[in-house]
Image: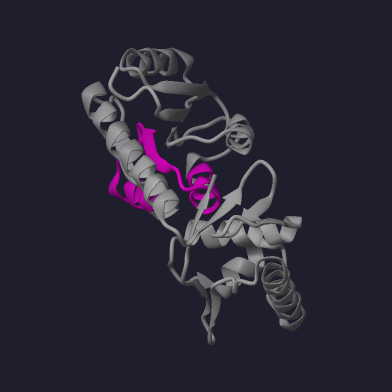
Amino acid sequence: MDNPTYKILFVEDDQDLRDSIVRYIEDEGIAVTAIGTAREFFSSIENDSYDVAIIDIGLPDMSGYQVAQFARLKTDLGIIMLTARGRVEERVQGYSSGADLYLVKPVDMQELLAAINSLARRHVLRSQQALASPDIWQLCHSTWCLLSPSGEKIELTGKEYELVKWVANARGKIIQRKQLLATLNYVDDEYGMRALNALLHKLRKKILKQTSLEFPLHTQHAVGYSFSGSIIIK
C-alpha cells in the first residue's frame, strides 16, 4: 500500500484480463478505473484526473493508437500501451502515438507495476514542482478557467481553452502552426491564419487586461509558437 494516491485509467476490452490486472494493481494500493472502450476513456478523462493511462490497442470502437494520440495531445498523463502486438513497426507506431512505454502481452505483472509506479511518480513530481513555482500558470479543466501566477482567474471561451490546453501539453516544445490550426478546426489557409491570429490577440489582450501580465506565448517566425513560462492542467 505504498502509493494509494496514484490514479490509473485502464482501457481493455477483454474483461477477464482486465479484471485480473485490476485486482493485482489494487492489491498494491493503487486506485484503478477500468473501462472497455475508447468512448468510455474519453468520458473518463473529461470528468476526472489520472496519473497514468494503460491502453490496449485492439479496442472495439477505435484503435488504441488513436486513443493514445488523443491522450498525449489533451492531457499530461503517463501512457502505457499494453497489447499482444509486438512487431517492431507496431512498437514504433505506439511510441509515435505518444506512449511512454510499450508492453507486450502476456505481461509480467511486476514489470507492469514497476512501469506504473515510475510514470505515476514522474507525473506527481511534475505537478508538485509546478505548484511550487511562483511563476506557474494553471489551466482548470473543470471550469475552463486560466489562473495567473498571481492568482487572477481568467474565464476562457471554448477556442481559448483548446488553445491554452495545447500550450500546456506541449511542455515547452515548439507548437507547429499546422497542428494548432487543425486542433482549433481552422482551415490551413489565409483565412484560417487570420482567425488564429485574432484568437491569439484577443486572448493576450484579455489576460493583460485582467492580470497586468503578459501571457508568455511567443510567435516563432514561419514555424509556430512557443511558451516560455510554466503551465499545468489541474
Where on the picture, by quarter, is residue 193? bottom right
Determine the residue positioned at 70% across, 74% down: 196
Q: Relative to residue 110, is residue 100 drawn left or right?
A: right
Quadrant housing residue 51: top left
Where is residue 128 shown, x and y percent of the image? Answer: 39, 45
Image check: 20 left or right of 208?
A: left
The C terminus: image quadrant: top right
Q: Quadrant of the N terminus?
A: top left
Horizontal side of 166 relative to 229 (left or right) equals right
View extreme (bottom): residue = 221
Q: Magenta stretch?
A: 67-95
In the displayed structure, 227 sits above or below 162; it is: below
Q: Position of residue 45 (x, y in %)?
A: 58, 37
Task: Name the residue located 22 percent from the left edge and 24 percent from the top edge.
Answer: 110
**Nearer to the camera, 48 or 138:** 138
Judging from the image, the colouring scheme is one colour
Tell me, yes or no, whether the highlighted magenta stretch contains residue 46.
no
Q: Position of residue 32 (x, y in %)?
A: 45, 22
Which residue does the image show at 68% across and 75% down from the upper left?
188
In the depicted view, which residue is nearer to us: 111 or 66?
111
**Horizontal relation, residue 155 to residue 231: left or right:** right
- Across the whole image, how many numbered discs are drawn on residues? 0
Q: Is residue 96 above or below residue 81?
A: below
Question: Camera-side residue: 2 or 45?
Answer: 2
Q: Is residue 173 above or below residue 40?
A: below
User: Is residue 86 magenta-colored?
Assistant: yes
Residue 152 position within the rendered picture, expressed as x and y whole percent measured from the top left: 64, 57
